[in-house]
Image (tube, rainbow, N blue to C red):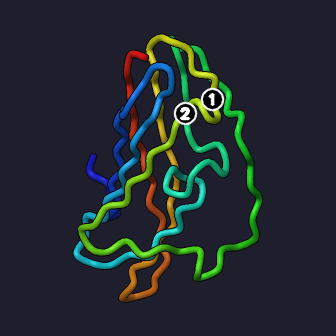
Amino acid sequence: MKPTHPLLCEMHLMASSPYTTVRFTLTNTSNNTLRVLPWHSAWEGWRGRFLSVTVNDEPVEYQGPMIKRPAPSKEAFKTLSANDTWQSQLTLNDVYDIKPGKLHVQYTGLLTYLNAASEEVEIAELTCRLEAEV
């Protein structure tokens, strides 16, 4: 089923052994500029648990920072131009104890965004997955 929102996320394994680095891509598939709140996602870095990670079907616990925040200000929203892409590379080993085996990473999250023309607040439910041998 095709999402009803204009945001598309993808994950790709960049490197593994001894460190597992993943590239996260967020694409604005619309013809409109969006203002996106990157909180709780790879596009702001390690600020909380936003991934589900398993190795050999065993859950791997997040061991990184957890940030609590007040309601977002307008400055917290970042511009993502029409048909443009954000990329972020994160090393899983920084916050997960990654062992050799079959790696499964899943991001399922809600990103808040504004259509820059209408300033209407909308929510995109995003899911992207990565499976690899590390």
Q: Is residue 67 left or right of residue 132?
A: right
Which label number is shown at residue 3?
A: none
Image quarter where the C terminus lies is top left
x, y percent for residue 19:
50, 26
For the residues bearing labels 2 and 1, Cβ distance under 8 angstroms: yes
- At horizontal 31% and vertical 61% (from top left) the residue drawn is 85
Residue at the limit of the structure toward the front, as seen here? 18
x, y percent for residue 32:
28, 78
- At horizontal 76% and vertical 70% (from top left) the residue drawn is 70
Residue 81 quadrant:
bottom left
- At horizontal 44% and vertical 51% (from top left) the residue drawn is 88
**Residue annotated with mark 2:** 92
Question: Mark 1: few, some, or many residues within 10 Å (few <14, many ≥20)?
Answer: some
Say if 124 sits above or below 46 in the image. Answer: below
x, y percent for residue 107:
48, 41
Say if 32 sits above or below 29 in the image. Answer: below
Nearest to the observer: residue 44 or residue 10? 44
Q: Is residue 84 left or right of residue 116?
A: left
Say if 101 sits above or below 72 in the image. Answer: above
Q: Amino acid at mark 2?
A: Leu
**Residue annotated with mark 1:** 96
- At horizontal 26% and vertical 51% (from top left) the residue drawn is 2
Q: Is residue 44 left or right of residue 119?
A: right
Measure the C-alpha gap from mark 2 to mark 1: 6 Å
Nearest to the observer: residue 44 or residue 114? 44
Q: Amino acid at mark 1?
A: Tyr
Residue 83 quadrant:
bottom left
Q: Is residue 62 left or right of residue 77?
A: right
Secondary element type, mark 2 = helix
Nearest to the observer: residue 1 or residue 51? 51
Question: Mark 2: few, some, or many residues within 10 Å (few <14, many ≥20)?
Answer: some
